[in-house]
């Protein structure tokens, strides 16, 4: 048996799933965690599973993170108790009722006694694979994918509107604290540990020129102008599972970064990722696609028009620009320090990613008024409908 299969099989047995792994495959999605699909046969039934190893360099308190996820999924279930199984994330539990397992040197270990920064320590979780579903690495220019994504993330926010955001652990402290991110970025520029600053002068200047704008939302939080909610914080279209045939959005996945946050960052991150004309690391041909942005906004506002405040609605397009600049700074920081955080497929990928995000950011700034008009128009019409 190959090494990975053996490992997956051992993990399954920890979650009381005994049987033979018929097939497994690595799922090449996401830049942080590692995921496998596996079909396990116990002599009677076939279980389809998603087995995931959490990157504990990024998620330093994975136990706290799994606790957050459990509470969030329970809350969502309590809001929609009759929801069919396909529309729920169902985590498997160990004999000790834990929704994770920690390993040291390949063997189960007590999570309280291990150091998650130790490379011989691993943290795994298992959940049911959702059948006949698909997700989108790009929205492929399809407005319907965007509209449905808006419905999915809008509904996610709505179902969690009464959840006490302050009671969640911050799985990555300062995750979308743009001011903090930019301070860290300029510190990395000053330190220049890899001598790469010279390769990124132009990009650094764009970030410097827009630093004050980037802090707009931090100031709004300081002044109490925008409410803190439970937000997803990684609202790419590949974090939604859709029905393969109907495009009905089934479930929002990747809840690792669910934390207190601003609605506009979640709104903006889908625009950044999917309402554009090129992939995340392609500066050539990258621009904002206003038709796709409109489609997303329509689906989103249908769900949350009555939940969001006027100030939040106005902040949505700003969220798109700010999150795009913030992510550019994160990609570029990672390039400057030697690619420690985001998985890369080729040496300069983080630099390319930063460049693509900056091109998109500049195009968003050019079209800020157009985005505002779309949001105002659709928010007025969705209000009329209710
Ligand atoms: C990371 O792993 P993935 O692809 O779901 C990152 C997000 C970025 C995104 C950019 C925990 O998400 O913040 O926006 O890459 N997640 C974390 O594609 O840092
Ligand atoms: Mg993801």
Image (cartoon, rainbow, N blue to C red):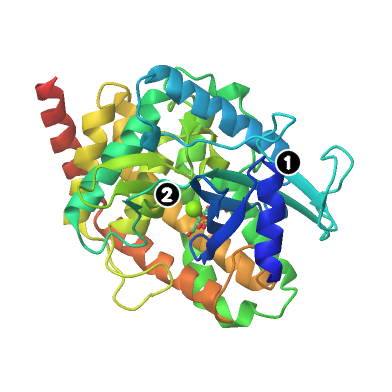
Near mark 1 (Cα within 10 A), the count class, few <14, some 14-19 or many ≥20, is some
List x then y, in percent, for residue 132. 32, 50
Q: Which residue is mark 2?
A: 239
Query: Relative to residue 123, is residue 6 depicted above or below?
Result: below
Q: Quick check: can you spot residue 163? A: yes
Judge left or right: residue 368 versus residue 260.
Answer: left
Q: Secondary structure at mark 1?
A: loop
Looking at the rendered structure, which numbered label has been put on residue 61? Answer: 1
Q: Nearer the viewer, residue 316 or 127?
A: 127
Query: Relative to residue 343, is residue 142 depicted above or below?
Result: above
Corner quadrant of residue 8 = bottom right
Q: Secondary structure at mark 2?
A: helix
Q: Pick whichever of labels 2 and 1 is earlier in the sequence.
A: 1
Name the residue rendered at 29%, 28% in the picture: 304
Dot 2 and dot 1 residues touching (CB under 8 Å): no
Image quarter (top left, top right, bottom left or bottom right) of the N terminus:
bottom right
Disc 2 to disc 1, C-alpha distance: 22 Å
List x then y, in percent, for residue 319. 39, 44
Specify the farthest residue to the right.
113
Judge left or right: residue 196 versus residue 374.
Answer: right
């Amino acid at each position: 048996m190959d090494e990975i299969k053996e490992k997956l099989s051992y993990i399954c047995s920890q979650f009381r799933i005994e049987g033979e792994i018929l097939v497994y495959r690595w799922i090449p999605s996401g830049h942080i965690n590692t995921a496998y699909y596996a079909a396990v046969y116990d002599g009677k039934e076939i279980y389809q599973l998603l087995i995931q190893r959490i990157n504990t360099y990024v998620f330093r308190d994975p136990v706290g993170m799994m606790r957050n996820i459990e509470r969030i999924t329970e809350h969502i279930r309590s809001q929609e108790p009759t929801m069919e199984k396909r529309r729920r994330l169902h985590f498997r539990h160990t004999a000790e009722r834990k929704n994770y397992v920690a390993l040291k040197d390949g063997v189960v270990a007590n999570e309280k006694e291990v150091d998650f920064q130790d490379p011989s320590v691993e943290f795994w979780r298992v959940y049911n694979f959702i059948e006949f579903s698909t997700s989108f690495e790009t929205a492929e220019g399809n407005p319907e994918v965007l509209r449905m994504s808006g419905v999915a993330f809008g509904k996610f926010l709505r179902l969690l509107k009464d959840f006490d955001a302050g009671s969640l652990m911050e799985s990555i402290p300062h995750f979308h604290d743009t001011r903090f991110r930019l301070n860290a970025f300029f510190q990395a520029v000053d330190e220049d540990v890899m001598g790469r600053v010279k390769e990124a002068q132009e990009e650094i200047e764009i970030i410097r020129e827009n630093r004050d704008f980037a802090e707009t939302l931090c100031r709004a939080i300081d002044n109490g102008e925008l409410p803190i909610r439970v937000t997803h914080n990684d609202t790419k279209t590949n974090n939604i599972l859709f029905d393969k045939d109907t495009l009905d959005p089934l479930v929002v996945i990747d809840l690792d970064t669910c934390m207190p946050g601003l609605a506009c960052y979640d709104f903006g991150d889908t625009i950044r990722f999917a309402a554009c004309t090129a992939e995340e690391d392609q500066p050539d041909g990258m621009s904002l696609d206003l038709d796709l942005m409109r489609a997303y906004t329509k689906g989103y506002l249908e769900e949350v028009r009555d939940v969001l405040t006027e100030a939040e609605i106005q902040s949505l397009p700003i969220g798109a620009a700010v999150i795009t600049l913030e992510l550019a700074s994160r990609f570029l920081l990672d390039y400057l320090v030697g690619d420690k955080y985001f998985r890369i497929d080729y040496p300069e990928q983080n630099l390319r990613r930063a460049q693509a995000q900056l091109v998109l950011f500049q195009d968003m700034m050019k079209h800020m008024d157009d985005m505002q008009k779309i949001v105002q128009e659709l928010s007025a019409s969705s209000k009329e409908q209710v």
